[in-house]
Image (spheres, helix red, strand yellow):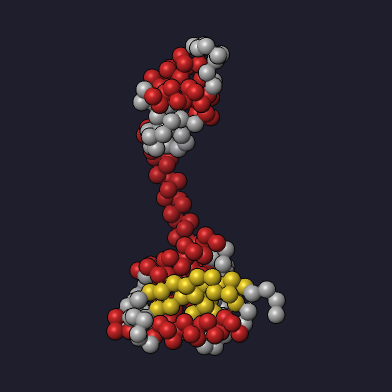
Amino acid sequence: MGKSVDVVAYFRTSSAANVGTEKGSEPRQREAVERFAKSNGYQIADSFYDAAVSGADLIENRPGFGALLDRIEGNGVRVVLVESIDRFAREMAAGVLGLALMKARSVTVIAADSGADLTEPADPMQKAMIQIALTFAELEKARLVGKLKAARQRKKAATGRCEGRRPVPVDTVALARKLNRRRPKGGQRSLRQIAAALAEVGHVQPQSGRAYHAASIARMIG
C-alpha cells in the first residue's frame, strides 16, 4: 500500500439527546468513517463535530463546519469524510450550499457508507444545482468586488485618499529628520536607533503602538 492521504472528518448529531460519549450517534459515525479511511488508504488528520445541529441548519450557522473550512484553507487537506450524505445535510438548500463551498475550494466530500463522491453526485439534478450554486457564488463575489471598488472611489473623491499607508504625523517626520541630522558620539544614528528614540517620546505606530519599522524611518527621512 502506498503512502496514506491526509483527510479530515466531519460529524453531526441533530438532537441534544444524541450528544455525549455515552450516546450512539457520534461514536457510530466515527467508527464508520475510521473504518472506511483505514480500508481506503486515508489518514484522518483532524475531525470536526457539530453537536445538536439540525441537518436543515444552514452551513454558515454551524460552528463545527466553520472550523472545518478554516482547517481546509489553512493546511491544504482536500478530502472530507462523512458517514453519509444526511450527516452532511438533510435539506437540499443546506446540502447544495455546503457542497458548493467544498467544490469551490477543490475539496472532495466522500460518504463512508457508499464511497460516493458527494461533490460530484451521480444524480444529474443534484449536480446541476451544485453548479448553479457555484455560479451564484461567483456572481455575488463579483457584485461585492464592484461595490467595494465603487465605495473606494467615492471615498477617494470625497477625501482625496482611500488606500495605502496612513500618513505619518508631520511632527513625527520632523523629529525623525532632526534625529537623523544629529550626530551623537559614535556616529550617526541608525534607522532602528531613530525609531527607538521616537518611541521613547511617544511617537509610535498608531495602530499597533509599537516603534516604527526601519523602512518607515527611511521613508520619513528620505
From this viewpoint, is residue 152 visible?
yes
From this viewpoint, is residue 220 visible?
no
Q: Residue furthest right?
A: 2
Q: Position of residue 96 (x, y in %)?
A: 45, 75
Quadrant hosting residue 161: top left
Q: How many marks?
A: 0
Q: Position of residue 155 (x, y in %)?
A: 38, 38
Image quarter (top left, top right, bottom left or bottom right) of the N terminus: bottom right
Q: Residue furthest front?
A: 186
For image coordinates 43% across by 17% down, the residue present is 174
Q: Position of residue 123 (x, y in %)?
A: 53, 85
Q: Residue furthest left?
A: 17
Q: Position of residue 18 (x, y in %)?
A: 33, 84
For image coordinates 45% across by 51% down, the residue present is 146
The answer to whether residue 51 is left or right of residue 216 is left
For image coordinates 55% across by 61% down, the residue present is 75
Indicate whether 208 appears above or below 201. Answer: below
Quadrant hosting residue 40: bottom right
- Of the pair 113 and 4, the residue shown nearer to us: 4
Indicate whether 141 appears above or below 172. Answer: below
Image quarter (top left, top right, bottom left or bottom right) of the C terminus: top right
